[in-house]
Amino acid sequence: MSEDKNRRLVVGGLLLGILMASMDNTIVATAMGTIVSELGGMDKFVWVTSAYMIASVAGMPIWGKLSDMYGRKLFYLSGLGLFIIGSMLCGTAQDMTQLILYRGLQGLGGGALMPIAFTVIFDIFPPAERGKVSGLFGAVFGLSAIFGPLLGAYLTDYASWRWVFYVNMPLGFISFGLLLKFYHESLRHREQKIDWPGAVLLVAAVLSLMFALQMGSKGHTWQSPVLLAFLAAFILCLCVFLRVESRAADPVIQLALFRDRLFAFSQGAALLYGAVFILCTIYIPIYVQGVFGSSATGAGMILMPMMLGSVVGSQQAGSKAARISYRNLMLISVVLLLVGVVMLSSMSPLTSRWLVTLYMIITGVGVGISFPILAMSSVHDLDFNLRGSANSQVAFFRTIGMTLGISIFGSVQSHLFVTGMKSAFPGAHILSTVHDSRFLLQPAVRSQIPPQVLSKLTGILATSIDRVFQYSIITVLLALICIILMGNARLQVGPATNTPYRGGEDGDVHEADGAGGIDGGGETSL
């Protein structure tokens, strides 16, 4: 079989892995109401999502480090295997505690898929082709966030909620088979010592922060002794982690990479973009369903314009990375994102659907551009043995941003909604039965509310979401600062021989290391 065909099959297997990992939380969120009604555990259901994200976030840099040490293939397949096993166990869960534990196992495996997949692409493709392929991966990431809720709703309504987990198994087996048979990497890896103290401290710090944020978003006051204890544990673990990593021979997170301006500010932008992306993905369907009164399927379909925009943005940015600097492409991205978020913050119950569609397209293009560009800028001019760690950190910071976005913006929106309710209905009985905005998403409840009261309630919901988008403008502006500070680096390709080159931040052009063929060894001419 030709090498080009081998590479296409490898890319196809990696795309399936990214599709499953990035789609998982959205497809599960759609089925949560049915899951709770069958398994119970209303007081625990938030951990079904949190357990997955915490395990995924904590595992990403560790998987990336191990792939640098012992090979991409071994740890991609190991992570994929854990993800498949976790998915199967989730589908067999008999109570909420079991489901939470199985989701943690699934998330641990999922943390390996995206960072190692992007690293494999950078190993087997030369710089001239990485932009196009990275754009394809970014488009799949955007597609997954849109189709996840629709697929979850369909499977829950017409099969069983358990199939939102079982659906991963055939896709996972195909991905596993393609990588096992057609990806033959070289053994070009150096022996390193595993930094177990750093790994344990990193997991402890992430867990402490996530527990604190989840408690804060679920009604605990910020003066709560337990919440303050988690915050103190996070700060302590983080400080000790940084000290340990600065002395480790082979640290889990290469702190030295952050001395490079391009790498450091790429991570900052990834974190901030993650927060804004998850905000749009979650709150636009809620707005459409709760304010406009659309069905759950209709609320999912409203994200389609954002999906199309992200596909276009991702593909165009990837194809132009060799001609335009990372910073300039990201400036286009952040301006579009800023315009989109400002427009979204101006929505009202009277806003027409075609205007919402336009807002979503603009926002989607802005976010889509960032997917391939931040991946490429993070591994720019890095040694082969550092690419896994670098790419895992992009996914790590983006997922951290998404998790922070869910916790912080979710807490703000809930507070604004409840405050608006108390102001509009002082002493009303509705306040004793309604403690968040989800009741507006239930058609049976909406139909029993008098029209004048429903109008006031939807207005309060609209205002709370608009205010959250207004606050998110600060996040976009912080991303703009990171992008401005990225420097002028860009991918360059020698015009005469098509030899891959990388441009340094000083404007000089440096010959790149040979991009590997399908074996990753660099011997095969592309």
Image (cartoon, rainbow, N blue to C red):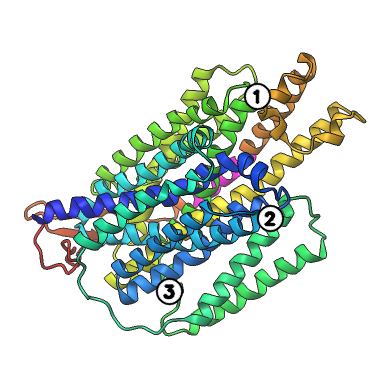
Can residue 314 be seen here?
yes
Coordinates of residue 372 in the picture (x, y in percent): 34, 49
Magenta span contains residue 184: no
Q: Quadrant of residue 79?
A: bottom left
- Secondary structure, mark 1, is loop
> What amino acid is found at the position of numbered circle 2 in the picture?
Gln
The part of the chain drawn in magenta is 471-481
* Residue 478 painted magenta: yes
Identify the residue at horizontal 29%, vertical 39% (top origin). Answer: 316
Which label sits on residue 138? none
Q: Please name which of the two marks, 1 or 3, marks the residue nearer to the observer.
A: 1
Q: Residues within 10 Å of mark 2 (few under 14, many from 20)?
A: many
**Dot 3, crowdedness within 10 Å: few (<14), some or many (≥20)?**
few
Visible residue check, residue 458:
no
Between marks 3 and 2, how big is the CA–CA gap? 31 Å
Specify the quadrant of the image occupied by residue 122.
bottom left
Estimate how packed mark 1 is, as few (under 14), some (14 to 19) or many (20 or more) residues with alpha carbons within 10 Å: many
Viewer-nearest residue: 320 or 279: 279
- Per the image, the residue denoted by label 1 is 291
Above or below, comparing residue 63 to residue 110 in the picture: below
Q: Could you tell me which secondary element the residue under label 2 belongs to?
A: helix
134 vs 116: above or below: above
Q: Which mark is residue 256?
A: 3
Q: Quadrant of the C terminus?
A: bottom left
Q: Earlier in the sequence, mark 1 or mark 3?
A: 3
Residue 315, given in percent of the width and then of the height, sits at 30, 40
Report whether 54 appears left or right of 376: right
| Residue type at tag 1 | Val
Q: Which residue is mark 2?
A: 214
